């Protein structure tokens, strides 16, 4: 008999928070528990709303990413990347104005390789390879940075980053006082 489990929208950790600096650990085996976590991540990402999410953003230090780049008028296209590794990256870079659910209300331009080839494990535990360009390449690299404890603001100048972090810390203080 199939067992149905309701998906849960989890809390997204926002910067500054030391948990976002943690290096995530590889997933040893894709189990029902891993799939339940990925289902929750996707639900959390859709609710935010966002186009990607790494497990560490909900406080789970595992190398898991979910993404969905489908447009509003398209069918959902959920993607799951477990233990992703970059096999090749282009020398050419492309700029993209990035945002991050863990860095609310901040957007800035980051340059990243405009093509990457990846190896990862999918939702069903199968090893796969994929080539990505455009927004897919940008988003997967942004999410893979989360697995290393890196935020997109770490790619900005030291001055910009410290201004953003000060603003976010102040926002958190005000929210705690309210
Ligand atoms: O927090 C995250 O890692 C998710 C982040 C992904 C991302 C966005 C842009 C460039 C690189 C990576 C987001 O989803 S921010 C929100 C966002 O981009 C968005 C939200 C609603 C509709 C469309 C986009
Ligand atoms: Zn992010």
Image (cartoon, rainbow, N blue to C red):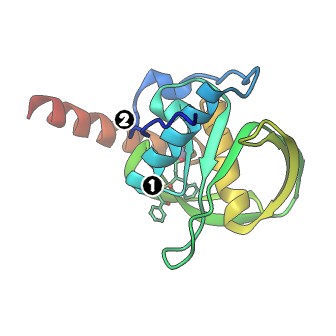
Identified at 24% across, 40% down, the residue is 171
Q: In which quarter of the image is the C terminus?
A: top left
Q: Which mark is residue 11?
A: 2
Label 1 neighbourhood size at 10 Å, few (<14), some (14-19), many (20+)?
A: some
Report the front residue among 5 and 123: 5
- Image spot of residue 92 (x, y percent): 84, 63
Q: Residue 46 carries which label?
A: 1
Is 121 located above or below residue 79 in the figure? above
- Asked if residue 95 lies left or right of residue 178, the reply is right
Q: Quadrant of the N terminus?
A: top right
* Cα separation between marks 1 and 2: 13 Å
Q: Which mark is residue 163?
A: none
Is 168 located above or below residue 99 in the figure? above
Residue extending furthest toward the right: 88
**Mark 2 or mark 1, which is nearer the start of the sequence?**
2
Identified at 65% across, 35% down, the residue is 64
Identified at 41% across, 57% down, the residue is 49
């Amino acid at each position: 008999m199939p067992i149905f489990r309701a998906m849960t929208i989890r809390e997204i950790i926002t910067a500054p928070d030391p948990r976002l600096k943690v290096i995530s650990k590889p997933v040893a085996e894709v189990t029902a528990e891993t799939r339940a976590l990925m289902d929750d991540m996707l639900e959390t990402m859709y609710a935010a709303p966002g186009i990607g999410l790494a497990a560490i953003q909900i406080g789970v230090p595992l190398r898991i990413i979910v993404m969905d780049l489908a447009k509003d008028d398209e069918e959902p296209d959920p993607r799951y990347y477990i233990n992703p590794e970059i096999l090749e990256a282009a020398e050419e870079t492309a700029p993209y104005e990035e945002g991050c659910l863990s860095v609310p209300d901040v957007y800035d331009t980051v340059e990243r390789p405009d093509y990457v080839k990846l190896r990862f494990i999918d939702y069903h535990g199968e090893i796969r390879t994929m080539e990505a360009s455009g927004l897919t390449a940008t988003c997967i690299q942004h999410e893979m940075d989360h697995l290393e404890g890196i935020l997109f603001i770490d790619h900005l100048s030291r001055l910009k980053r410290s201004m953003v972090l000060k603003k976010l810390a102040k926002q958190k203080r005000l929210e705690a006082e309210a």
